[in-house]
Image (spheres, grey):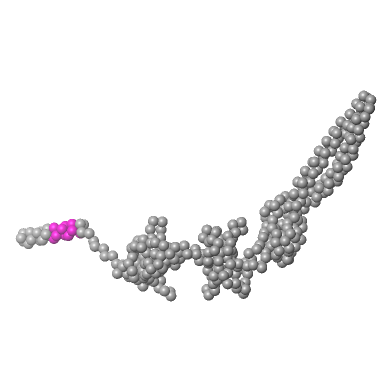
Amino acid sequence: MKQKTLRKIACLGIMALSAGALVGCAQTQEPSVKIVSDDVSDEYSMVEVDYGDVVLEQQISCLYSQVSEENLSFSIENRELTHIYVSDGDSVKEGQAVAKLNVDDLEKKVRDNEDLIEQCDLIITETNKLIDYYEGILSGSASLKKREEIEFKISDAKQQLDEVESEKKGALRENNEFGAIIEKSVLYAGMDGTVSSINKSFIGTRPSKGATVMKIINTDHCSFISRNEEAFELLNVGDPVTIDVSEDKRYNATVIEKDAEGGRVIMDLDEPDYSIKMSTRGTINIELERADNVLTLPREAVHTTEDMAYVYRLTDKGVRELAEIEVGIMGTNLVEIKNGLVPYEQVILRKGKIGQ
């Protein structure tokens, strides 16, 4: 009986030790984690690194319109615009008055001053005659008392003469000032042409100096005109350009003028096309940089930050990964690949298959 009991105790001890050993192993063993990557290759459109020509272009817009045009504005202000002598579409001749500011008060002052000047001239003439008369008396044999009286009259006449002459000079000076303002109060057409627009909102107001009141154009000579700042930087007189107006229509032209004052570059067609309509819009592509027969990718496939350029590609297991690359010219459609990829290697163009 004792032997059976001892055997049970021994067995229990062995089981306890075994259990303790198992517990200890469970505390020190690290579990293994299996990472499974899904194949996502079916989710992307791919593109090959291939050889091509990379071209960087600058697009400049232009408009087919009249070359001769002028914006009319007043060179004075604080005067009400009261008269417009023409209407939209009217033909005008060079030198024709087309608008006028209200200067009635100045015109009245000029007329009053002219009357005053005429009176002054009459007084000056008569006073000079009187002085000559008195001086004639002094040259004769007049008594001392008489001479003193005549000299006093001469002095008084000369003082009056100075006052009248001063008043005349003041009137003349005012008329010169008023006349300059009156002259600037009228707008004149600077060329033969057609009134294309009038700012009727200015009527009854006081337009600011330099504000366009109306525009006159001459459609006898039309050209493509660009008002882009880039056109001034990139184009010079004599440069040939190609102007695209639609997918299947383009014109060859030549830069004939850089009008800095008007802020425009003018280009004449090499072969006139009388069917082209006014206000036809065009685009000029100017080549800035070029690299021929280099490794390229579409711009859509290349991503950039301030510090790097990179693409996405798929591993053999179909997992997307980032690959840093070195690029050259970032062209209009293609990017030059200098390092980081090999010919005909595939990279991700976009997410989603073509046509999806």
Task: Name the residue at the top extreme.
Answer: 144
Any part of residue 300 in sight: no
| Location of residue 98 in the rendering, given as x and y in whole percent from the top left corner | 74, 60
For residue 108: magenta? no
Side of 347 relative to 239 (left or right): left
| Location of residue 199 in the rendering, given as x and y in whole percent from the top left corner | 70, 60
Type of secondary structure dominating the magenta stretch: helix
- The one nearer the camera, 41 or 20, is 41
| Location of residue 209 in the rendering, given as x and y in whole percent from the top left corner | 68, 52
At a point 52% along the width and 73% down the height, the residue shown is 247
- The one nearer the camera, 111 or 350, is 111
At a point 44% along the width and 67% down the height, the residue shown is 333
For residue 21: magenta? yes
At a point 81% along the width and 47% down the height, the residue shown is 109
Q: What quarter of the picture does the N terminus occupy? A: bottom left
Q: What quarter of the picture does the C terminus occupy? A: bottom left
- The one nearer the camera, 291 or 29, is 291
Q: Tag count in the figure? A: 0
Q: From what the image shows, is residue 240 above or below residue 187?
A: below
Residue 169 figure quarter: top right
Side of 61 relative to 21 (left or right): right
Side of 62 relative to 333 (left or right): right
Residue 246 figure quarter: bottom right
At a point 70% along the width and 61% down the height, the residue shown is 191
| Location of residue 351 in the rendering, given as x and y in whole percent from the top left corner | 40, 69
Residue 216 figure quarter: bottom right
Q: From what the image shows, is residue 64 above or below residue 105?
A: below
Q: What stretch is highlighted in magenta?
A: 15-26
